[in-house]
Amino acid sequence: MEDSSVLTLRHPVSITSMGIRLNKRPRAAPRVQHSLSINFYQSILQSFLNNTHIMSKAFCKHCVDVQELPGKPAGKETKYGGVNAYVASGSKKGTVVVATDIFGLAIDNPMIVADRFAKETGYTVVVPDLFNGEPISPNDFKLPKHKDEPQPEGADKNFDIFGAWLGKGNKPDETYPKFKKVIDQAAQEGPVAAIGYCYGGKLMSLAGQDGAVKGVVINHPAMLEKGEAASVKVPTLINASEVDPIFTDDVKEDWFDTLKSAGHLDPASTTYKNAVHGHAIRPDLNKPDIKKAYEDSFAKSVAFFQRVLA
């Protein structure tokens, strides 16, 4: 699972001490609908960026590793439900709303995937800017390039950097109201489904609990808790990565078992062998197992949308 590639962003950005600012993306101010404890966020941050055992397995590198997908976005950036968003138009009545990872629209990957979904399903795909033009930057973190390397100088600040970014209004319970605005707008035009990656997986849980969509797809999620799945009310497809301590085995087992018992777990849900966190949105296509997991996750998501939006 070693990778020494350089982390880069495709769009021009200006680095700040607490993330990045994208040009021409104005701020908004969604308020809290769902609350989670400070202790919960601290535990997530600690395991996400400041755990020696996890770092020794290069897990955190995969959490912030930006592998670029081939192609260029073909859709348009516009306002949707009052929210800045990327829209890939389809020909059928129905919408898929995408919740990104922590890199938001600073990288092309979610827009390229949105274009693919629109082409394959025929549905319009909307990717809202969850972070008011200020997603996090992988360049802010100090991480070893290989799993056996020691922590580089400055790695002890990773926790503070990520925590500061979350504290700027970027916790899931603060970004979800914006995501819900997009869902509500789309619902005026037809049935709606949603898909989330990493950070966005938590928003899928919130949307599923609200019953706001016809179904959700969760890809290698972050910040899910044991017991949370019991509140989900809609069909759910889970594309999990085998190498993913953020979606720990006990939490994953609880989600799979709970959703299956409730009749909400899509039978295509699986954990992809040798796949790493991020495989469905930032895959290293030079690695056969990762490429297979990426393509299979995409194909299963297409089939899921065709079923729940029909």
Image (cartoon, grey):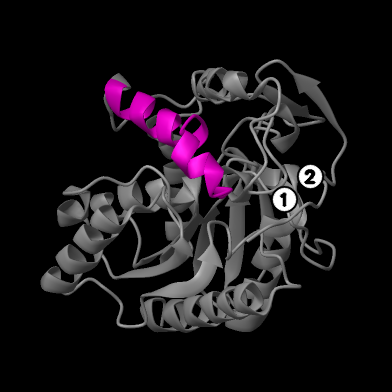
Location of residue 187 by image quarter? bottom left
Location of residue 23 by image quarter? top right
Q: CA distance from mark 2 to mark 1?
A: 6 Å
Mark on residue 66? Answer: 1
Q: Are marks 2 and 1 in contact (CB under 8 Å)?
A: yes
Left-right relation of 186 to 3: left
Q: Which of these two is toward me, 280 or 143?
A: 143
Residue beneath the point at 31% across and 31% down: 33
Q: Mark 2 sits on what residue? A: 7
**Can I make out residue 232 in this image?**
yes
Residue beneath the point at 70% across and 15% down: 17
Left-right relation of 214 to 82: left
- Is 48 contained in the magenta span? yes
Residue beneath the point at 60% across and 57% down: 126
Residue 270 horizontal/vertical position (percent)? 38, 75
Segment tinted magenta in the rendering: 39-59
Residue 213 horizontal/vertical position (percent)? 35, 60
Q: Which of these two is toward me, 113 or 139?
A: 139
Looking at the image, residue 40 lies above or below residue 284:
above
**Quadrant of image for the C terminus:** bottom left
Q: Residue furthest right?
A: 12
